[in-house]
Amino acid sequence: MPTKKPAAAKKQPAKKVVSAKKKASAKDDSGLPLSVVIRRRIEAQKARFHANDNIAAFIQPGELEGLVDEVAEKMQAVLESLVIDTENDHNTKNTSRRVAKMYVQEVFNGRYVDQPTLTKFPNVSRLNELMIIGPITVRSACSHHLCPIMGRIWIGVLPSKESALIGLSKYSRLTEWVMCRPQIQEEAVVELADMLERKIKPIGVAVVMDADHFCMQWRGVKDRDSKMINSVMRGAFLKDSNLRREFLALIDRK
Ligand SMILES: [Zn+2]
């Protein structure tokens, strides 16, 4: 893959740029799929658009509705390829649109909307004691099969005197924003920990995620009781084993 990509890009960069420019301005409304328009904006900025990336910066107001239409159309084609009679089967008549809305507006919405705004409070009482937030309910989907991942997250924060604290509910909002994308659990917890470090600038941050992966239950090995547990320890949580032990003892994973 990595060897192929640059070669393909080399072949036609001049052509690509020209046609992208022409079409993005001229053909937005006339036939060019919206996903292609958005994709070209992303590529022009050389940004990444993996399943767990947020691409809100490249989407203009009103375009999400257009994306729902496009996904519904393609979802309909999937149902047809599955040889399902959506015309006569009343249960599947509007399934394509329901699934498209569910993807774009709910379960993958964290890809398409801006990060929730965070009110930050200065650490006036100079708290430097362990704070634990959780369990926060997690609903996500695996990038491999788009099967649900249902679980819980605990966040530990050891603020410094200079830390900007965020409201308790914001931890849930941030978690939801990261998780409402097709994810890989190992990457999701790291992304969440990175974001908390950037926002709060604490002495330490810890994230523990405990989840059921439906791709293990619904398909594949059909192992109903298997769970995946990930933890990320940063700063003080990494260096101080007492702090780490205290955090792990206080979260109740039963
Ligand atoms: Zn999976």
Image: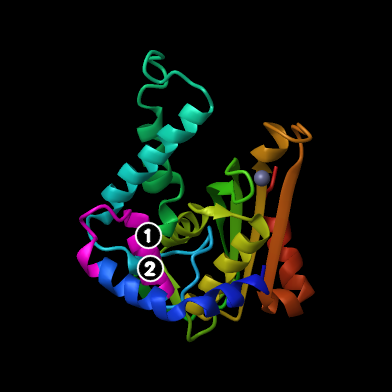
Q: Report the residue at 59% width, 77% height from top.
A: 6
At mark 2, the secondary structure is helix
Question: Relative to residue 189, is residue 213 depicted above or below?
Answer: above
Magenta segment's dominant SS is helix
The C terminus: image quadrant: top right
Question: Relative to residue 72, is residue 15 depicted above or below?
Answer: below
Q: How many neighbours does mark 2 have within 10 angstroms: few (below 14), some (14-19), or many (20 or more)?
A: some
| Image spot of residue 220 (x, y percent) | 75, 35
Image-based side of 30 in relation to 93, left or right: left
**The disc label shown at residue 36, or none:** 1
| Image spot of residue 171 (x, y percent) | 47, 61
Image-based side of 113 in relation to 155, left or right: left
Q: Report the residue at 49% width, 21% height from top.
A: 84
- Closer to the camera, 68 or 136? 68
The N terminus: image quadrant: bottom right
| Image spot of residue 13 (x, y percent) | 46, 79
* Residue position marked by numbered label 2 in the rendering: 40
| Image spot of residue 128 (x, y percent) | 56, 78
Image-based side of 245 in relation to 140, left or right: right
Amino acid type indicated by mark 1: Val
- Boundaries of the magenta span: 25-43
- Quarter of the image where one finds residue 132: bottom right
- Closer to the camera, 55 or 238? 55
> Is residue 33 visible to the viewer in this orientation of the structure?
yes
Q: Are marks 1 and 2 in contact (CB under 8 Å)?
A: yes
Within the magenta stretch, is there residue 132? no
- Closer to the camera, 68 or 198? 68
> Is residue 116 visible to the viewer in this orientation of the structure?
no
Amino acid type indicated by mark 2: Arg
Which quarter holds ligand 1?
top right
